[in-house]
Amino acid sequence: MAFGIGRAMVAPLMFINFCLYFISACLAGSILNRNLDNNLAGTHNQIGNVVTVVFIPIVLITCMVGIASTLAGTHHIRIWRTETLAAAAATSVIAWLLTLLSMGLAAKEIHTGYGRSKRLKTVEAFMIILSLFELLYLLATHAGSVTREGYANAPGHRAVKNPNYGTPAATAV
């Protein structure tokens, strides 16, 4: 593969992304649950600051799309054809863009400052780290399509090496 990037390189990146997205979703869900419980109880001591109200739902959406991206990538690694590349690349691009949105909100949350717990700081850090890892995963997924080895059904690739093998369509009629 290009620069030695193939299935062996994409799989660890995908596993790292899956773990980080899953942990971020669990932490963000916990923060959202605690904030909702505090609002329902009438005590308005929320975790975080004014940005947290927007940040946590966006992180949850980002994590779900990121996990879907890793699942599409798992299917792509298993099959390794251009058809599965399209699905893996599309979900990966969407997950990366949502992760960039979450990273921007995390930066705003850090800039705003007050009221941040350790869980919230961890989610912010994971979103910043995931923006890089998702980009690396996206580039590694596409790197397989630009090599001479490429995929089994790439344009110009003949599944049958012998042109005399099989019945030509013109003589079959």
Image: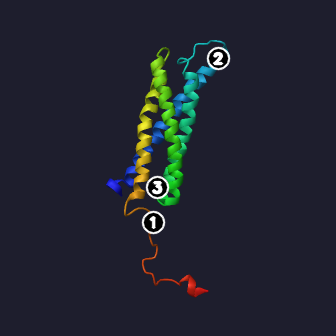
Report the Cα–Cα distance between label 3 and label 2: 44 Å
Q: Which residue is mark 2?
A: 39
169 and 7: which is toward the camera: 169
| Residue 105 x %, y % | 50, 27
Tell how many labels: 3
150 and 28: which is toward the camera: 150
Residue at x 48%, y 19% (from the top left corner): 117
Q: Upstream in the sequence, badge 1 or badge 2?
A: 2
Q: Quadrant of the N terminus?
A: bottom left
159, above or below 39, in the image:
below
| Disc on res. 32 | none
Pair 3/1: label in front? 1
73 and 22: which is toward the camera: 73
| Residue 80 x %, y % | 46, 59
From where the camera sits, is residue 117 visible?
A: yes
94, above or below 144, in the image:
above
Amino acid type shown at disc 3: Ile
Residue at x 67%, y 17% (from the top left corner): 40
Pair 1/2: label in front? 1
Amino acid type shown at disc 1: Ala
| Disc on res. 77 | 3
Amino acid type shown at disc 2: Asn
161, above or below 43, in the image:
below
Report the Cα–Cα distance between label 3 and label 1: 13 Å
Q: Quadrant of the C terminus?
A: bottom right
Q: Which element carries disc 3, helix, strand or loop? A: helix
Q: Are marks 3 and 2 in contact (CB under 8 Å)?
A: no
Residue 165 located left or right of residue 32: left
Q: Which residue is mark 1?
A: 152
Report the Cα–Cα distance between label 1 and label 2: 56 Å
Q: Are marks 1 and 2 in contact (CB under 8 Å)?
A: no
Q: Upstream in the sequence, badge 3 or badge 1?
A: 3
